[in-house]
Amino acid sequence: MSSHHVCPWWFAYTFDNPLRKLFHKPATMLGDYVHEGMIVMDVGCGMGYFTLGMAELVGNEGKVVAVDLQQEMLDIMQKRATKKGLLHRIVPVLAEPDSINHNAPVDFILAFWMVHETPDPESFFRQAAALLKFSAKLFYAEPAFHVSLERYREILTAAEKSGLAVSKEPAVRFSHAALLEKVV
Ligand SMILES: C[S@@+](CC[C@H](N)C(=O)[O-])C[C@H]1O[C@@H](n2cnc3c(N)ncnc32)[C@H](O)[C@@H]1O
């Protein structure tokens, strides 16, 4: 069973703070998968920590589709993007609990610390896989302090039933993480 309790927008300040760049470095974590000119998605983008990091990686020809359930998160993300001069590279999308609400294909998806909040991870991964081009990657991570290893493994099984295969499990601080590849 998923708890699908959604992280309140104000709680995100506890982990999305200036210290975060010491242990979650977007360019180091994602630089092998996100390149200039790509259209990538940050689903469950929150306040946009990785949205902004990926906006730097995709350059002026690329786009980051930043999806969240909470308008407050999208508003804060857009304010941060404006301050960094990156807003023109970002497409904000307001999701619904059981719908990503986006149909156009993307080259890469990041789902960081959010799948456990969705009501049905298998349905979530099916939608995500449908957006990915063949052999494109989805980087999935859960907070280890909140999601047990057993629950993470159950969610990975749901991903595998949705046309995604685990290609590796990268080390990410405070997280369980997997790099998934679209295989069907
Ligand atoms: C713990 S926060 C992580 C935010 C961000 N990924 C980060 O690492 O800073 C989880 C985010 O996922 C969003 N979320 C939860 N369920 C969602 C869903 N079904 N669709 C889109 N976003 C969702 C929440 O609103 C929240 O902003």
Image (spheres, rainbow, N blue to C red):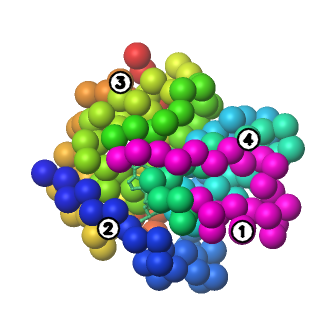
* Residue at 52% in and 48% down: 94
Callout 3, which amino acid?
A: Gly
Of the numbered discs 4 and 1, the one sitting upstream in the chain is 4
User: Which marked residue is nearer to the observer: mark 3 or mark 1?
Assistant: 1
* Mark 4: secondary structure: strand
Q: How far apart are the alpha carbons under marks 3 and 2?
A: 25 Å
Mark sitting earlier along the chain (3/4) = 4
Q: Is residue 128 left or right of residue 106?
A: left
Give, as a three-letter code, the residue at label 4: Lys
Quadrant where the C terminus sits is top left
Which residue bears the numbered disc 2?
Answer: 144
Q: Gap in Å between the C-alphas at discs 3 and 4?
A: 25 Å
Question: Whole-Å distance between the Cαs marked 1 and 2?
Answer: 27 Å
Circle 1 is placed at which residue position? Answer: 80
In percent of width and height, residue 65 lies at 63, 43
- Total numbered circles: 4
Marks 1 and 2, the one that precedes in the sequence: 1
Residue pointed to by mark 3: 163
The picture places residue 20, in percent across and down from the top left corner, at 57, 76
Quadrant of res 166: top left
